[in-house]
Image: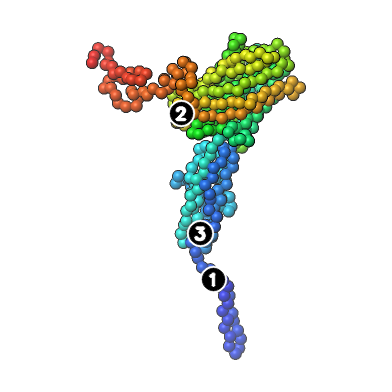
């Protein structure tokens, strides 16, 4: 309370003189607004509020793991001292430190930020040929939202510039969206979706086989998120799909599950069998996927994870040449015992530990076997 404006006045018989001054009491920084721990979905925008007062007025800076946080295309240090991070990515998960400093000292407060889920949008291009028809460049745009019961995520996608001659046949190709629904599926328990595992950077190769003999191959390249938080995809398709006799026949896609198996560092295998109904006839078809990603991102928390796809709708509009899909997706821990014989072999292979690589096992040559290892001698020698 001693701070303020003061005036000194001196008088005598011949006059008066006065001087004014302002007394400022210096003080160390004190936080007036502290950042709170925040949990947000990927692609959202985080604002960590941090404000302080003191005399002289303190400067506010941010750091992460001891390193200064600097402005870039996604990160902005606001004039009031707060930190804004746009288009959140999983790698933004961390503890952030807000530091206020002036001549009399400094204060620090930490705030955890957790990024979960997956991107809220996806976009990309699709090129190739279906049933020997080149269809130029089609464009994919999708939105992702939580379902009302919060147990799944709802993906709604539209593909434009799909020629009329192949559009009706492509209504059954929900697999063209597989990178989108795998990346954004609702995570149940400790299971992780494709975004959490790979930061949305991966290659996915898919083969679709119809019971009637047609085979279609697809390659998806996921290039991460753009500055607006949208998943970026490039898709190439090539091959044949079952052509329905009636172009206006209704197509009903059944719910299905998709098992993801960790084959090794940075490699997954996925498999599913589907049914679609056309004119009251059920037709099975299978999908096999190989996914590769940066092995430094680690592994799935479980050897097998199961993606559940439900409430699937599909529609083709010949006037607008657009394809529309809607699907709900969640991902959970998988059950090894429920796999087919071929998948069980894959699980065993992926579960095997390479003793030759993990430790100094043999003096000369080490040969890894499924569940064991064998030491060998150079040519001309024996144990």
Residue found 26% across the figure and 22% down from its top: 363
Q: Circle 2 — which element?
A: loop
Q: Position of residue 222 (x, y in %)?
A: 56, 28
Q: Give the colouring mode of the picture.
A: rainbow
* Label 2 – label 1 distance at C-alpha: 63 Å
Q: Residue furthest right?
A: 319
Residues under labels 3 and 2: Cα distance?
A: 46 Å
- Residue at 47 percent across and 18 percent down: it is 343
What residue would you read off at disc 2?
A: 302
Instruction: Give the SS element for disc 3.
Output: strand
Tell me the crowding category of disc 1: few under 14, some 14 to 19, or many 20 or more residues within 10 angstroms, Cα based.
few
Where is mark 1, residue-wise? 1
Q: From the viewer's side, name the closer residue of 87 and 41.
A: 41
Residue 71 percent across, percent down from the top left: 55, 45
Q: Name the secondary structure under disc 1.
A: loop
Q: Relative to 107, is 132 on the left or the right?
A: right
Q: Which residue is mark 3?
A: 30
């Amino acid at each position: 309370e001693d701070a303020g404006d003061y005036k000194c006045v001196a008088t005598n018989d011949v006059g008066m003189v006065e001087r004014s001054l302002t007394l400022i009491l210096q003080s160390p920084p004190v936080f007036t607004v502290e950042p709170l721990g925040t949990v947000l979905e990927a692609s959202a925008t985080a604002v960590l509020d941090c404000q302080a007062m003191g005399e002289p007025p303190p400067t506010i800076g941010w750091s992460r793991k001891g390193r200064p946080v600097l402005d870039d295309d996604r990160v902005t240090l606001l004039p009031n001292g707060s930190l804004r991070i746009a288009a959140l990515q999983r790698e933004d998960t961390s503890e952030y430190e807000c530091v206020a400093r002036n001549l009399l000292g400094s204060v620090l407060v930490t705030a955890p930020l957790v990024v979960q889920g997956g991107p809220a949008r996806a976009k990309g291009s699709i090129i190739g040929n279906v049933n020997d028809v080149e269809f130029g460049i089609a464009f994919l745009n999708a939105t992702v939202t939580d379902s009302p019961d919060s147990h799944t995520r709802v993906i709604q996608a539209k593909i434009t510039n799909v020629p009329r001659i192949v559009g009706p046949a492509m209504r059954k190709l929900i697999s063209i969206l597989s990178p989108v629904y795998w990346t954004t599926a609702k995570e149940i328990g400790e299971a992780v979706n494709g975004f959490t595992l790979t930061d949305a950077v991966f290659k996915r190769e898919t083969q679709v086989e119809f019971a009637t003999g047609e085979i279609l191959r697809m390659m998806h390249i996921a290039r991460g998120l753009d500055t607006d938080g949208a998943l970026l995809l490039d898709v190439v398709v090539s091959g044949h799909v079952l052509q329905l006799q009636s172009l206006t026949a209704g197509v009903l896609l059944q719910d299905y599950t998709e098992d993801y198996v960790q084959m090794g560092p940075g490699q997954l295998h996925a498999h599913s069998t589907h049914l679609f109904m056309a004119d009251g006839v059920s037709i099975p078809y299978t999908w096999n996927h190989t996914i590769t990603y940066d092995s430094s991102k680690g592994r799935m928390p479980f050897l097998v994870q199961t993606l559940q796809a439900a409430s699937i709708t599909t529609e083709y509009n010949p006037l607008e040449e657009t394809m529309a899909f809607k699907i709900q997706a969640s991902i959970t821990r998988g059950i090894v015992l429920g796999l087919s014989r071929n998948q069980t072999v894959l699980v065993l292979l992926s579960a095997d530990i390479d003793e030759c690589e993990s430790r100094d096992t043999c003096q000369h040559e080490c040969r890894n076997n499924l569940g064991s290892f064998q030491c060998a001698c150079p040519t001309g020698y024996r144990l």
